[in-house]
Image (tube, grey):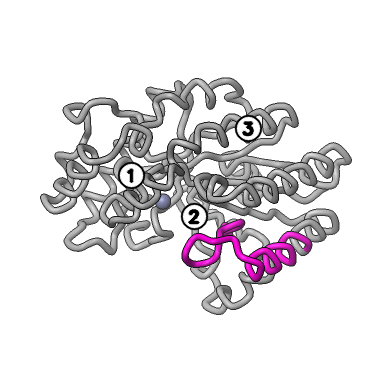
Amino acid sequence: MSSRLCISFDFELGWGVLDTPEWKTREQLGWYKNLRTALNHLTDFLYANEIQTTWAMVSSMFVESITDLKISHLNHQYQEAVETFFTSCEYETRCALDCVELFNQRPDLIEVCSHTSTHLYPTLQSVSATEYVSDISNSILDLTTLFKRPVKSLVLPRDDSTFLKDLIKVEQLNVRVNPSIYNANQHFSRRSSTPASRIVLGQLGETYQSGSLFFNPSPGGRFNLLRKASFSLQLKSLIKKLQTTQKTYHVWLHPFNLVQSPIHMKMFMNFLGMVAEMELRGSTKTSTMREIGDIARRHMQ
Ligand SMILES: [Zn+2]
């Protein structure tokens, strides 16, 4: 038996920061536009090497016209924020319809996962559990219809698990959670090493899978020398664990980080090259969140 590696991407374009001026800055830097080339390059490699990955998507990225946006369940304040973002940004900042074909080329390797419909998060002012659950249910329905495959996993925006109990009553999902939900001290060790994913089976058949943020730049968006050095250590440790243990490791990243500087992309592609080699040798196996959830249900029930 080998280790397992789950790689999940939070694919959200400007929706991830729609209520802050951050999307505008990233748009002006060309990150959302340039992301298309990076996604082509990345998926080419994933498909050629049969690497499985999970893509947590904001389903409103696949809406072309503002009249088709599902926002009536939202509180007035967030509704307004969504509309302002939608009408103020460029197409590439909000819409990913041009990427659908790319993800449909190898449905056996790409898991489509929900990252909500509008990137609503519980700590926003006056967000209710009903509103939050509706946002996720809308996204599951819309992603299932668009990609014509079941959507069984969820990534919580900003790792905020406040309404998890309300959600699980309605949707049985494989949910990615922050490792700190299990260990209050985890964030101290996260910088230099990636903890094994803790996989917990819930009472209603849902699973909770902890995942570590991987390959993120330093605060301010720069991949400076210090961050490069700490990432190299992180990477070395992860590779060793993948080769020597039988545990599951779950790492995640925002794909737009890959276009911030050429070195981001280069280092991540090197990592994927090592993953492909390890998988070929049988020392690790890449898996989606859905597959890891299915295994947990088979073994733990
Ligand atoms: Zn997000």
Residue 294, position in %: x, y? 60, 41
Q: Which residue is drawn at 39% across and 61% down?
A: 161
In this rendering, position of residue 161 left or right of residue 223: left
Neighbor class of circle 1 (other Cα within 10 Å; few <14, some 14-19, many 20+) is few
- Mark seen at residue 41: 3
Q: What element carries label 2?
A: loop
Q: Distance between the residues labelled 3 and 2?
A: 37 Å
Badge 3 density bin: few <14, some 14–19, many ≥20, Cα 10 Å: few
Between circles 3 and 2, the one closer to the viewer is 3
Q: Left or right: where does residue 81 sit relative to residue 43?
A: left
Q: Which of pointers 3 and 2 lies earlier in the amino acid sequence?
A: 3
| Residue 202 tag number | 2
Nearest the viewer among 174 and 68 is: 68
Q: Name the residue under label 1.
A: 170
- Between marks 1 and 2, how big is the CA–CA gap? 14 Å
Q: Do the residues labelled 1 and 2 touch (CB within 8 Å)?
A: no
Q: Label 1, secondary structure: give it.
A: loop
Magenta-highlighted residues: 211-236
Task: Say which amino acid is labelled 1.
Answer: Val
Q: Residue at horizontal 38%, vertical 40%?
A: 58
Instruction: Report the disc number at residue 190.
Output: none
